[in-house]
Amino acid sequence: MREVFMLWFTQMRVRFGFSVMRYNLHHDKKKFFKSIGILTLVVFALAEMLGVYAYLCHALYGVAASIGHPEAFISLGIVAAQLMTLVFGLFYILGALFFAKDSELLASLPVKQWKVFCSKMLYVYAGELGVSLCIVAPVAVIYGIGGGLGALFYLKMLLALIFLPAIPLAIASLISMLLMGVVSRTRHRDMITTVLSFVFVLAIVVGQNLFTSQLSKSGTGQTAAKLLQSGDGLIRMIGRYFPPSIWASLGVTQTGSDSAVNLLLFVGISIAAIVVSVLLAGRIYYAGSLAQLETNGRSRKQRRLSFTAGSPAMAIFMREMRILLRTPVYALNSLFTVVLGPVVLLMPMFSSGTSNSADMTKLFAMIGSGKGYYVIFALSGISLLFAMINPAASTVYSREGRTFWLSKAMPVTPALQARAKLLACYSVAVATAIMTIIAASVTFRVPALYALGAVVFSAVISLALTAVNMLIDLLRPKLEWESPQEAIKQNMNVMLGMGAGLLTIGVLAGAGWLLTLASASPALIAATVFVLACVLSVVLCRVVVNEAAHAYRRIES
């Protein structure tokens, strides 16, 4: 196992740039303190998002405690962490294991392929463990403080947290191996990988909702009432979607031998899942990863060359869209929100009893009561949430990598390139907003006029979000990477962009809140926020375009 940990440690050093920071500490203080400053901003952005998340968790804990079952709060956090790992772990594994440029180098080393696979899995595991920590830590702290629990609870929670990503990543690795086994035999590997990955993730989301609907049809209400009579009934009800979460939840919340048995069962199954994935997937890893390095056969169809002059801006726009579509990691992370939002919002229509429930009836009545401005605000907030987590703009320059010299060599000004890139990223954000608002309007029976107002409102704010995210990547692009996955999944600009986007929305929401305190009318609030968003969008766009020329020269030097 020595080779496994050596390879893993090397990958982690490259990922976090420890060697570069140590070198800069002794030879280039300016770069060192610049790295420290950027790291501080990332921590601030992460703390900003975790603060909002912790506030929501605190409210959810109050609901769970009010019904007498606060332990269900822990189960919800564990299920959320494992579901996130299963969905996004597949993208992570595809990028780190199969689309990394170091696969050929690692294959040439005198190291068995299962050991290389283990080092890659540890690399992915460390990243997903950080995500699980961000999801579960606020839940554990709120639950522990609320219940007045001691150190033993936090030790059990730490043990469960360490093994939370194990089973979802084992499942994701086996699925990715099957996917690569099929894709490696085809000529259009990138397109098929993207489509099948989209189908897989959507199947998880749709399947979860359909499963809930089937439970509702089979009289789950009576079953739930019976389960609520027992102390761990609600945990078992929540854990139906993923049984290992039951063992982890009961192991953490129970005491004595029951706690030990459930916790040991969870840890044992997690270790077994990883061992099985190594034994099965580790033996065929090179077959899938090295196949991605092969070039496709030349098509027999002769393409007709055209020398018709076109718009440089449109050419750059189409180039950006092709980069997004042709690289599976980019497509899955940047374009998935266009599909995810509508699917999530449309699923309640197919859940039995949801549309006719008392809560939905009250919501329909409120929407039809003439409170149009509040409906517009709500729809815009939902659409902007999905637009804010989209990394297309915050990695637009980083995605070029070492080929950035091509952009500098183009006979096109940096300002024009910036406008075209801004348009490409903005089109993704607008598509996300429009599709999400349409789906929400269909599900919640929103009048067309309100939906149109939300689209206009979201389109303006999305432009500001796109510009501020693009500005961050323009100022410090990540051009040195070994796999496309690093450019988008291991890029601190994504986290900075989310923080800046949340701050931008917070400024606009704060202006509306101040007007509300001043007893302003909803029309005045909407008009003021809209004008402020327009001004902010114009200013940020001009800053991006003007900064492009300076940034190109700085990057070249």
Image (spheres, grey):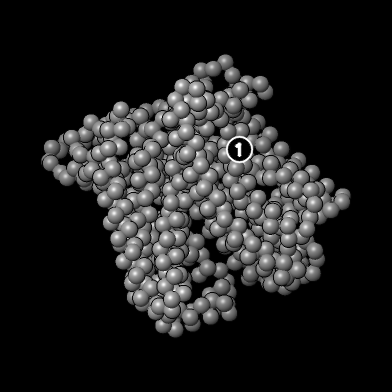
Q: Can residue 357 be seen at all in this image of the molecule?
A: yes
Q: Which residue corresponds to the image point at 51% horizontal and 65% vertical from the top-left?
A: 347
Q: Position of residue 367 (x, y in %)?
A: 45, 79
Whether 414 is drawn above or below 448: the answer is above
Q: Residue at x 29, y 54 (%)?
A: 539
Residue at the disc numbered 1: 125
Check the picture and name the quadrant holding the N terminus.
top right
Measured as percent of width and height from the top left, residue 128 is found at 59, 42
Label 1: which secondary element: helix
Outermost residue, left side: 308
The amino acid sitting under disc 1 is: Tyr
User: Which quarter of the rendering shows the C terminus?
Assistant: top left
Q: Residue extending furthest top?
A: 110
Name the residue rendered at 45%, 70% in the picture.
Answer: 513
Give the left or right position of residue 232, taking residue 542 as reference.
right
Q: Position of residue 161 (x, y in %)?
A: 69, 45
Quadrant for residue 321, please give it. top left
Query: Between 374 and 51, which is closer to the camera in this rendering?
Result: 51
Asked if one can make out residue 243 in the rendered structure from this viewpoint, the answer is no
User: Residue 442 location, x and y as percent?
Assistant: 43, 71
- Is 375 on the left or on the right of 319, as rendered? right
Please identify the residue farthest to the right as the structure is shown. 257
Neighbours of disc 1 within 10 Å: few (<14), some (14-19), many (20+): many
Q: Nearer the viewer, residue 3 or 143?
A: 143
Residue 327 vs 525, above or below: the answer is above
Residue visible at 46% across and 28% down in the picture: 29
Q: How many marks?
A: 1
